[in-house]
Image (cartoon, coloured by chain):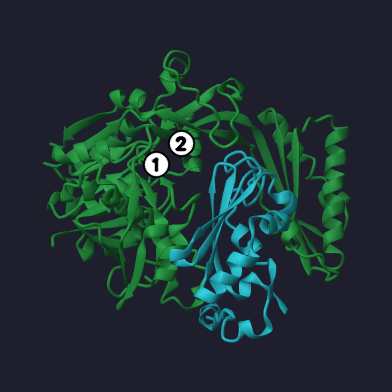
Chain colours: A green, B cyan
Amino acid sequence: MRSVVIAGGQGFYGDTPTAVDALLAEGIDYLCLEALAELTLAILQKDRQRDESRGYTRDLPAYLARALPYVADGRTKVITNAGGINPTAAAHAAIETARKMGVSGITIATVVGDDVLGRLSTLHTDQGQSLMHLDTGEPFDAFPGEPLFASAYLGARPIVDALAQGADIVITGRVADASLFLAPLVHEHGWAWDDWDRLSAGILVGHLLECSGQSIGGNYSGDWWALPHPWDLPYPIATVTADGTAVISKPKGSGGRVSTDTLRHQLLYEVHDPARYLSPDVVADFTSAHFEDLPEDRVRITDVRGTPATDTYKMLLSAHAGWAGEARVAFSWPDAYEKAKATAAILRKRVEIAGLEVDEWLVEYWGVDALGGPTVPPTTHEPPECILRVSWRCADQRTAGLVGRELVPLTLSAPPAGMGGAGRGAGSATELLSIWPTLVDKSVVDPEVRVVLEEVK
Amino acid sequence: MARIALRELCGYRAGDKGDIANVALFADDDETYALIVREVTAARVKEHFGAMVRGRVDRYEAANVRALNFVMQGALGGGGPRSLRADSLGKTLGGALVRLEIAVPDDAMAGRRRARPDVSWADEILAT
């Protein structure tokens, strides 16, 4: 049976492109680069605010530089949502990269239409979209301020359209992570859009591949220390046949591990109900999948079931939420925790006296319970050292910066032996963004979704 | 009966979506899975996290991979780009969950305790 080989070459904006070389050398039909998280869209929004030609993940050229020789040879195609909130600008960057490398005769497709910011109020007032908060149920009228971006999570269809039109590289905005991987399977195997079990198998495979090394040993809670050469963790590969059977593997001779155990860690990552994983293309039942360990770091996945997709896309909106500052001070034994706590209190008092308005404080004691909070059992053990981290939120950037300055004189005027550490409080304040997940009818988004093709000459 | 922290028995991974964190718990065999299905209820997890999780905790079962998935609302201080927490994405919440202690029959632990890390290879690298 004919099989299609797809690989996950990126798990987030900032991942390393070097592991892509081994994937390409292995011989893959499609390299899928998943560049977006909720936080990434917020970062890209800040980028676009500063410069309108930005708003895509700027490591795209570094990835393409590695892949382009294979694309030019017709060996591999690339699919990525690196377009972020500005896929057209990302496509320009891709074309520029190809030209610089002397690659021509390839077709780059851009998928647009996921960005509905410009017509958000029309969608709400005239097209019956409630846009209520998906998690809290708050009505759209309670949206906190002006929306900064509004991206619908599109599915695999526009990518399949682009591939059918001969695209060698497909660049999208907010296409759902797993759908990037489903698209080449639908295109190559000719799966129908109502073949729910196969679509579900493709989404499950996509979900396993979308976070690069995280399915084959990264962030692995098993015997993580026993994985071979962990400083060079590989990225995952899936070989998928037309019936939806998938074999997950990794480049020969690489580190990491492919096992049911490493894969199940990723299977439930960022998942709510695993029996109803909502993708734009299908509702996948991850609890139906059968995993079988094979020799040589391979796992076969069969029997994945799915049910019809919903009529809505998930959509992410965002609003400005104030400015944050942060500072850290390290204290040594003895009485490290008490010194840290007193210093936090002194800072708050100084800020109050200075008349600076702080809307929210957060105090963490690293080395005591900063990460575990109430799950850390009470102890009489005295920590050998403690790092105080204070974070605060203010309405404006200037105030957030001034709060951090109040910490500086404490170097000589606070409880003994505090050692100033790095932190954003010392420098500039950071803009906070609140995010507002919601749903939008596919019927009002799809008419605006387009594929734009450009041949690199 | 003995009281055993889940770290002795289970694997874990946490993820984020907005202000919702999910933590999956993985058992190594059917007996351990039956044990955590019985002992690690949504209510116990909610109590364990205390003020760290403001909203509801729901539990889902994935018996095909011997996993429980806990979905915790209001768990990330407003969600990644809004949160003041150092761990704004809740990456460490899996470790926080496996601190939870459950009652285990005395004879049930034989051969089931997870190994502790051996990082002698790291010592070798760091000594150079």
Counting residues from the start of the chain, the first of labels 1 and 2 encountered is 2
- Decide which of A304, A61 is in the foreground and name it: A304
Residue found farthest to the top: A126
Residue A122 horizontal/vertical position (percent): 44, 15
Disc 1 marks which residue?
A: A57
Relative to A412, residue A359 above or below:
above
Q: Which mark is residue A44?
A: 2
Q: Is residue A217 visible?
A: no
Viewed as shown, does residue B111 lie left or right of A176?
Answer: right
Report if the CB atoms under discs 1 and 2 are less than 8 Å apart. yes
Q: Quadrant of residue B44?
A: bottom right
Q: Position of residue A223 (x, y in %)?
A: 50, 76
Q: Amino acid at mark 1?
A: Thr
Task: Report helix, strand or loop for mark 1.
Answer: loop
Q: Quadrant of the N terminus of chain A?
A: bottom left
Location of the C terminus of chain A by quadrant is: top left
CA–CA distance between discs 1 and 2?
7 Å
Q: Position of residue A120 (x, y in %)?
A: 45, 20
Residue depicted at 46% across the width and 37% down the height? A41
Q: Residues within 10 Å of mark 2 (few under 14, many from 20)?
A: many
A299 left or right, relative to A152 = left
> Which element is circle 2 on?
helix
Q: Amino acid at mark 2?
A: Leu
Q: Quadrant of residue A27?
A: bottom left
User: In the rendered image of this protein, does residue A281 appear above or below residue A420?
Assistant: above
The answer to whether dots 1 and 2 both sit on one chain is yes
